[in-house]
Image (spheres, rainbow, N blue to C red):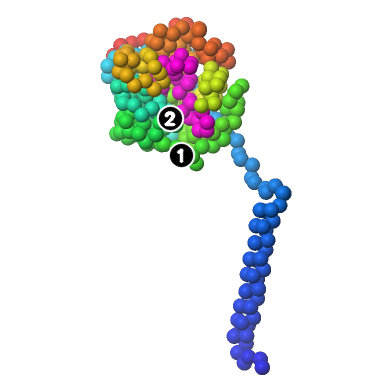
Amino acid sequence: MPSKNKNVELYDRRRFLNRVAYACAGAFGVSAITYIARSGEPVYRRPEKILAIPKFTVDVGAVYPRMAIVHGTDADRMVKAALEKLGGVDKFIKPGDRVLIKPNVAWDRSPEQAANTNPLVVAAIIKAIMPARPASVTVTDVSLNDPYRCFARSGIESAAKNAGAIIFIPNEGDFRTADLKGSLLTQWPVTRAVFEADKIINAPVVKHHSLSGATLSQKNWYGMLGGRRNQLHQDIHTSIADLAQAFRPTLTVMDATRVLMRNGPNGGSLSDVSVFDTIIAGTDEVAIDAYSMGLLGLDPAGQEFMKMSEKRGLGVARWKELHHAEVTV
């Protein structure tokens, strides 16, 4: 006998139809999963986007030196003097810029051991660019030892934070595939911090290296990469030149306050460290590396990656021929 209440009847029919629909959907889902699991047909995946690394260089004109060498014992005064010689911080950083600073924070070492960039130099760079009113200043590196210990023990974490910067330690999900366009290095995972920056300041330290002779500004770009970086050591000179070609910073500020003369790149013994109390800043990384090699007693002309980089037009190894300034503060 039909129900006297048409609303109840309609509700019961709808409920029945919904149950049938859910059952069918469930059966289809199980069938689809089974098909995918057992079928030899490829499953469609959206192709990964390959990014291009931006060029962060700025044109400051020919009036100002391309490199400034500053001697002294006060990191703040030294970095400030170097930027003034190069034309002033406003030549490099504009209001609202997102600035990324890349020191060497590879090792779980103290500042005195000179395996990482001096935290006083990192802080001095941050303080020197703050008057330009950047939107943010981030300090990052892809450390070789435990990154949290590296940033803490190196003194860079506290120094950078106290100066007003943000520390970014990338995890596995923080890398994007980029085309490095190198002769050896092509597609490689690069920290996403690179693609979120408007300006990049390279802040390496002068160190001996057992394979390449020296680890300086061009090799410091290893710390932007993820993946199996030990593979790069199989042809280290080409790898360095490829990285220097791929990463074109706004500014480089080389730390030569304490220099690891032997047993690099991680060192450990204070007897391997010499004090030079020098900052080398500029826009020509090849020239900066050439000057820095002199502190290590190396001839730039004898270093394969230097010849490669100069041949590619990345800079001038004969730094004395470059427009430069040298002062003591």
Give the residue number, with chain letter if any, for mark 2. 144
Check residue 212 for magenta coloring. yes
Q: Secondary structure at mark 1?
A: loop
Q: Quadrant of residue 106?
A: top left
Identify the residue at image location x=65%, y=62%. Answer: 30
Residue in the image at 67% along x and 68% along y: 24
> In the rendering, at what x and y percent does residue 9 appear?
62, 85
Q: Is residue 221 rendered to the left or right of residue 124?
A: right
Viewer-proximal residue among 208 and 130? 208
- Residue type highlighted by circle 2: Leu
Q: Position of residue 197 (x, y in %)?
A: 47, 33
| Residue 164 included in the magenta stretch of the image | no
Q: Quadrant of residue 169?
A: top left
Per the rendered image, the range of residues in magenta is 203-229
Q: Which mark is residue 171?
A: 1
Quote the CA–CA distance across marks 2 and 1.
13 Å
